Amino acid sequence: MSKNDQEFSLQAVPRTQRNQFLKTLSVMLGFTFFSASMLAGGELGIGLSFTEFMLIVLAGNLVLGIYTGALAHIAAKTGLSTHLLAKYSFGEKGSYLPSFLLGFTQVGWFGVGVAMFAVPVAKAMNWDVNLLIFIFGMAMTASAIFGMKSLVILGYIAVPAIAILGSYSMLKGVDTLVGMQGLLDYTPTQTLSVAAAMTICIGSFISGGTLTPDFTRFAKSSKQAVIATVIAFFLGNSLMFLFGAVGAMAYNLADISEVMFLQGLLIPAIIVLGLNIWTTNDNALYASGLGFANITKISKKFFVIINGIVGTVFAMWMYNNFVGFLNVLGAAVPSIGAIIIADYFFVKRRTYKEYASMSFKKVNWLAMLAWAIGVAFAQLAPGITPLNALLGTAVVYIVLMSVFSTKVSNEKVMTNDHTEREIAG
């Protein structure tokens, strides 16, 4: 192992360097404990009854759990990050497209996350927002430099704190609604269709979920990786949605920080918001570093620092102007994961050769075409956009690979037959 690649950004994670289950679970829960999920839960809470909300969240996070669980299985089996796995389906140079899209979106969300903490805290405490952005952004960048070790430690601290303080805030919200019966009797002030609600639920974290292999490649077994991931996305993410939704139902506020401020929980709100964003943002920097390292072959640590500085400097601009663009770009990300899953399970039938012995083609244009068709299908077809992206892209990729692989094989057979006849003649 190179001293410059202690995070195995350009190679498979050796079995001797794999982590125990609790470390993997800590990292994945820290990743999914994110304020944006609470905000999405708040949006659902304003537009759905409590029963409808629970059904939507459980169904949506079940989809996320299946999707990310499949990626976790592949990562633990191969020891490879999302970016290195993409080489098997997209090709050596073709993998640069997924790496750029994933790296770019994560830098964007890092900047948005920094501002999501700084803006409400600066307002509540009457502090300078730019100074707070600089301090918080640099602190998160500094901890992300240490890679997986810091992600594990941060998860151990943040996950229990968020769960306890968030639960306390939620219980206060239930009291405001006059108990559980009031929560069950809640009538939403707006209406939200099932398709729109499922899109919010699945779309809230499917972009980040595509990066699951970056963290679960360190798991000792695929079973541990899948269990940790499903717990994080199905249960952990559902809990974040629940925190946000109950606050919205009780106070008609979708932002959890505003709810906690209103409840008089100023310091707990700052702790929850800070830890919540810190864990996810460190994962975002880590993943973006892996993406740009795949493209440039420069150390991941270098890009963690650069991306952290860029995200911090442009945090307010991203917060005010970039969220909509990131959501649009995020629609292109699930198609990447769909191709990786389809390639491993259906095209290659779980028979990936070891990464070190592989000789990849430069670009698999069929994967590029399937990705483009999948993204277009997701946007144009009716229904649930993230599901359209996953299913549409996977089907197109499998069909294209099946048809054109068969055609190439037939051409080789015909060429061999023709050569044999010439020799015989």
Image (tube, rainbow, N blue to C red):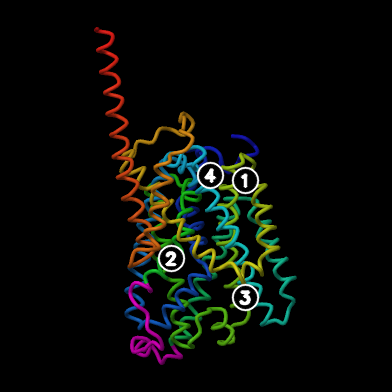
Amino acid at dot 1: Lys
Look at the numbered discs 3 and 4 and tell me whether their residues touch, using CB distance below 8 Å.
Answer: no
Q: How many marks?
A: 4
Q: Of residues 24 and 73, which is closer to you in this image?
A: 73
Is disc 2 placed on a helix, strand or loop?
helix
**Amino acid at the residue labelled 3:** Ile
Residue at image coords 51%, 47%: 97
Disc 3, SS: helix
First of labels 1, 3 by sequence position: 3
* First in residue order: circle 1 vs circle 4: 4
Front one among 68 and 87: 87
Question: Circle 1 — which element?
Answer: helix
Q: What residue sits right under mark 4 in the picture?
A: 96
Residue extent of the magenta highlight:
175-197
Alpha carbon distance from label 1 to label 3 = 30 Å
Residue 188 belongs to the span the image colors magenta: yes
Amino acid identity at mark 2? Gly
Q: Tell me where residue 233 appears, x and y as whole percent.
A: 42, 62
State how far apart marks 4 and 2 are (Cα). Answer: 23 Å
**Residue 83, above or below 142:** above
Label placed on residue 270: 3
Q: CA distance from mark 3 to mark 2?
A: 26 Å
Q: Where residue 49 sits: x, y (%)?
A: 35, 83
